[in-house]
Image: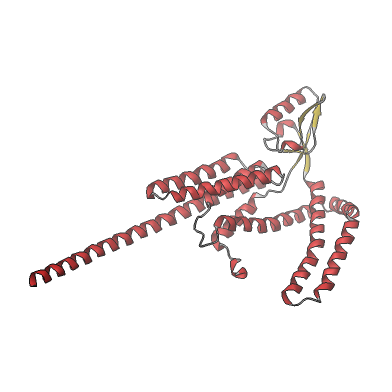
């Protein structure tokens, strides 16, 4: 009895020691994994911030985003994720970056071919997809989608603000062009005004939240029309300029078809001029057949990427509290 009792006590004590060692080992591994996750996160966010700062500076200064910025984000984002995946045997880390990259490749090409962004902005967005990644943890709102929502909101405010600044800088030209736009959209403006008044009057017959929504909808048609006229007016007076062929850079948007001797060299449908076309234009200028090319410049949009990225990192999906 004593022998068997003693064996039982020894077995229990040995089991407790074994469980205690396993517990502390697992706790140590969890802490190392947490530390590595934090290092990975801040390393990626740091690289993303540096890349966006460099891209914003270049975009504001030259209206161009160097390819090395975008490609650095793509390769460093996927490369760092691959290293951490190999070190921790957690392939999910790499695949999150790969999926984020592929999602943003689709979005970037979509906006590029719709003429909303230049090639530099599109490539930069791909790099951010690799940096942010698409989390497979569906218990929380995906950070990639959070960034896209912030980019839509901040980009809209940023874009309108930039247009207003340009309108003030060219106010005499803007006044003339805006009056012309008002004349062009006068019938549409009357229709939107009538719709807005109708919604305001109708809102008094609805209670609570429905009244608020109808008042908001009443403002939107008029606001949208005036924003469109603002965009169109500023675009006409500030976004077009003539440049020499040798001053063109790959990706510049050609505003008007360049046709020499019945041959079309480049035009708006090219979605950005390439090096071969630039060389051809330089050659034609040397022969005295052309002098300058009309190009269209856009808003330096990369700073809005930087702001949206910073808000996503610092505040996350802060607006979820108002929805839930």
Is 95 situated above or below 265?
below
Kindly identify the residue that appears in the image at 61 percent across and 56 percent down. Answer: 308
Colour mapping? secondary structure
Give the residue at the far front of this rendering.
1
Q: Is residue 222 above or below residue 249?
A: below
170 relative position to 35: left or right: right
Seen from the viewer's position, the closer of residues 251 and 215 is 215
Q: Depth check: 172 or 188 in front?
A: 188
Rendering quarter of residue 200 = bottom right
Q: Is residue 228 above or below residue 62?
A: below
Q: Relative to 289, does residue 308 appear above or below in the rendering?
A: below
Where is residue 265 drawn, in percent x and y?
76, 29
Which quarter of the rendering shows the N terminus?
A: bottom left
Left or right of 302 on screen, residue 235: right
- In this orientation, does residue 311 appear? yes
In the image as oriented, which residue stretches furthest toward the top?
287
| Residue occupying the point 38% across, 56% down | 33
Residue placed at 68% from the left, 46% from the top?
Answer: 111
Tell me residue 185's x, y (percent): 88, 54
Q: How many marks?
A: 0
Quarter of the figure with residue 66? top right
Q: Where is residue 114 in the image (x, y as percent from the top left)?
A: 71, 45
Q: Where is residue 252 in the image (x, y as percent from the top left)?
A: 71, 38
Q: For the view shown, which residue lies furthest in the left direction?
A: 2
For the C terminus, the image quarter is bottom right
Residue drawn at (39%, 46%) of the image = 86
Left or right: residue 142 compared with residue 3? right
Residue 54 can be seen in this image? no
């Amino acid at each position: 009895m004593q022998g068997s009792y003693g064996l039982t006590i020894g077995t229990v004590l040995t089991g407790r020691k074994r469980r205690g060692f396993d517990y502390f080992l697992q706790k140590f591994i969890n802490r190392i994994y947490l530390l590595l996750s934090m290092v990975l996160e801040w390393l990626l966010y740091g690289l993303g911030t540096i890349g966006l700062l460099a891209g914003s500076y270049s975009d504001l200064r030259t209206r161009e985003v160097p390819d090395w910025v975008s490609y650095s984000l793509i390769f460093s984002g996927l490369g760092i994720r691959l290293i951490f995946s190999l070190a921790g045997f957690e392939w999910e880390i790499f695949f999150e970056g790969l999926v984020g990259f592929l999602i943003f490749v689709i979005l970037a090409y979509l906006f590029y071919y719709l003429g909303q962004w230049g090639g530099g902005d599109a490539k930069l967005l791909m790099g951010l997809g690799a940096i942010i990644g698409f989390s497979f943890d569906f218990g929380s709102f995906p950070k990639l989608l959070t960034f896209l929502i912030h980019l839509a909101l901040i980009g809209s405010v940023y874009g309108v603000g930039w247009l207003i600044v340009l309108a003030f800088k060219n106010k005499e030209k803007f006044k003339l062009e805006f009056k012309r736009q008002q004349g062009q959209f006068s019938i549409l403006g009357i229709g939107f005004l009538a719709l807005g008044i109708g919604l305001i009057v109708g809102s008094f017959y609805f209670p609570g939240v429905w009244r608020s929504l109808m008042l908001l909808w009443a403002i939107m048609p008029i606001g949208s029309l005036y924003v469109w006229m603002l965009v169109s007016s500023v675009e006409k007076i500030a976004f077009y300029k003539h440049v020499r062929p040798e001053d063109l850079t790959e990706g510049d948007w050609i505003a008007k078809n360049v046709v020499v001797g019945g041959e079309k060299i480049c035009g708006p449908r090219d979605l950005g001029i390439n090096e071969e076309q630039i060389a051809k234009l330089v050659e034609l200028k040397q022969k005295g057949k052309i002098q300058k090319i009309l190009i269209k410049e856009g808003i330096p949009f990369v700073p809005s990427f930087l702001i949206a990225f910073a808000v996503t990192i610092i505040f996350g999906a802060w607006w979820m509290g108002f929805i839930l």
